[in-house]
Image (cartoon, helix red, strand yellow):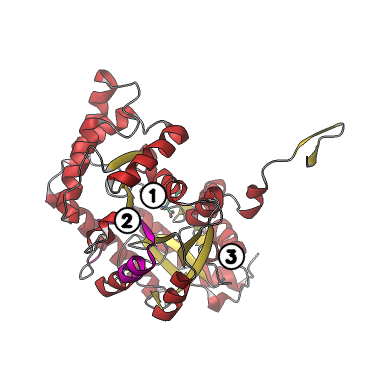
Amino acid sequence: MDFIASGVNCIMPSTSRRLEYFTESVIRKMTRIANAYGAVNLSQGFPDFQPPNPLLQALEDVAMNGPHQYAVTWGAQNFREALAKKQTKFMGMPIDPEREIVVTCGSTEAMMCAMMTVCNPGDKVIVFSPFYENYGADAILSGAEPIFVPLHPPNFSFDEDELTRAFEQRPKALILCNPSNPTGKVFTLEELQFIAQLADRYDVFVITDEVYEHIVYKPYKHVYFASLPGMFERTISCSSLSKTYSITGWRLGYLIAPPAIIDGVRKVHDFLTVGAPAPLQEAAVTALGFPDEYYEELCEMYTQKRDFFIKGLDEEGLSYTYPQGAYYVMMDISEFGCPDDTLFCEWMAKEVGVAAVPGSSFFREDVRHLIRFHFAKKIDTLEDALQKLSTLRSIAKRGIF
Ligand code: GLN
């Protein structure tokens, strides 16, 4: 048995070796740094505005009337029914609330459950790079081994030969974040069809992360991977209510998949968390019933925020990637000559008063010239951030660190 020193006079067994292969979330660490310096927090992506009023009203009702005890482990009946109705409409295919949905604690749990359901230790999983940082830890915790396939700027498209070579290594699954965090890329129908034919040819599962499904800017369109011909059978669609209804703290996510996969997911989920919070599921049924205009207005609101924020970056002559979906902008910091984006972000939070996420936490490759901002904030907050960013160059001239 391995031992580690603990204190002066005692030793204790060492913790799991898997912990050596991933760090704490850099995104969430940046929120702590933002709070410590009182910086405008454009790092961890969550809104600073209220969720829709009818949803808050429903929450108030639930406080008095319940439920306050466990829901069915794979999701409250009325929540699954409301979700199935909404997703049937948007995905354009029938979703069975009885056999094809598991409700989870955020899409974070959904992705973990998906990985643990399909992967054996040693299985390979294709991950596009840059990638949302959770996928690396998901792979390690489920024993899978990532095969990274680069997304090439400026469009962050994959090279067909590189992707084909990854499939030739016989992976068990591919993870597809669409719209993509952190790049804001929306995969085209042609790209998705290319992935689909490879998934079919090599018999691979596709695990999607579609939490930004309703934040897609015109003229781009979201195509649900599961809705492509023949793909529902091999797709585990993960998503959540966090971004769509501005309730990231409610931790309501879900998986949609064929019954044979869902049977496995139910088992994993049951022993990981038992279930998502029953009172919050009950209140969220109201949101799942919102009319189509809600989603149009959501997109309109984020379009305004995106345009406002990037206009401010343009005015400062700062260069960035143009988001087609989601609510992130990757800004290029090459001009500042700082070799370490993590140090740059800590310095910027402290000295400039704006927090961002170092881009290196999303890339497999050694990329240190990008940082990620999110713009899911009130216009006033974005204005404050832009005002502070207008001092970035002059403060940097005095020296970074
Ligand atoms: N998805 C958000 C982001 O990328 C929030 C991440 C999290 O902390 N769950 O910033």
Q: CA distance from mark 1 to mark 2?
A: 27 Å
Please, what is the three-letter code of the amino acid marked with disc 1? Answer: Phe
Residue at 36% of width from left, 59% of height from top? 206
Which secondary structure lies at badge 2?
strand
Residue at 42% of width from left, 63% of height from top? 182
Residue corresponding to mark 1: 46
Q: Is mark 1 within 8 Å of ligand 1?
A: yes
Q: Quadrant of the N terminus?
A: top right
Which secondary structure lies at badge 1?
loop
The reply, left or right, for residue 334 in relation to residue 208 is right
Which circle's residue, 1 or 3, is located before the other in the chain? 1
Please, what is the three-letter code of the amino acid marked with disc 2? Answer: Thr
Q: Is mark 2 within 8 Å of ligand 1?
A: no
* Residue lying furthest top: 64
Pair 1/2: label in front:
2
Q: Is residue 27 above or below residue 362?
A: above
The magenta region covers 195-217
Which circle's residue, 2 or 3, is located before the other in the chain? 2
Q: From the top left corner, tell me how far across and down residue 66 is, in percent.
A: 27, 21
Residue nearer the viewer, 138 or 246: 138
Residue 212 lies within the magenta run: yes
Pair 2/3: label in front:
2
Q: Are marks 2 and 3 in contact (CB under 8 Å)?
A: no
Which circle's residue, 1 or 2, is located before the other in the chain? 1
Residue corresponding to mark 3: 344
